[in-house]
Amino acid sequence: MDELLKTAEEAALSVKGVASLTGKRITLGKDKDQALVFDVYLLAQYGSRIPEMAWNIQEELKKAVAATSEAEIAKINIHVQGVSFDEKE
């Protein structure tokens, strides 16, 4: 599981518009069918388009997990905790 979390963090941070991960960073659980459920907590960079950024995080995370694991993903929830006015945190 630690490897999946590291992979998920790298994927999320690679997306344009993500300033940093916050607090819980990324949590990983399973649904009733044992498929993975990711919760990503982040700060968005000022001026980024949040819906587009969230979609891109989901897509990058799916690709990254598929490349390293055969686990099925049920959900990827994006939690924008705030906006960063700095260039990159």
Image (cartoon, rainbow, N blue to C red):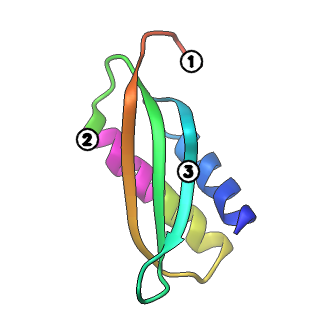
Q: Please indicate whether residue 56 sits to the left or right of residue 22 in the image.
A: left
Amino acid type, callout 3: Ile
Measuring from the top left, give residue 15's x and y in whole percent: 49, 40
Which of the two discs, 1 and 3, sits closer to the camera? Answer: 3
Amino acid type, callout 2: Pro
**Cα–Cα gap, marks 1 and 3:** 19 Å
**Residue where numbered disc 2 is placed:** 51
Q: Would residue 16 be visible to someone looking at this image? A: no
- 36 vs 25: above or below: below
- 34 vs 25: above or below: below
Q: Which residue lies furthest to the right in this view?
A: 3
Mark nearer the N terminus (2 vs 1): 2
Q: Which residue is drawn at 57% across and 43% down?
A: 25
Quadrant in which the C terminus appears: top right
Q: Quadrant of residue 68?
A: bottom right
**Residue where numbered disc 1 is placed:** 88
Q: Would residue 30 be visible to someone looking at this image? A: yes
Amino acid type, callout 1: Lys
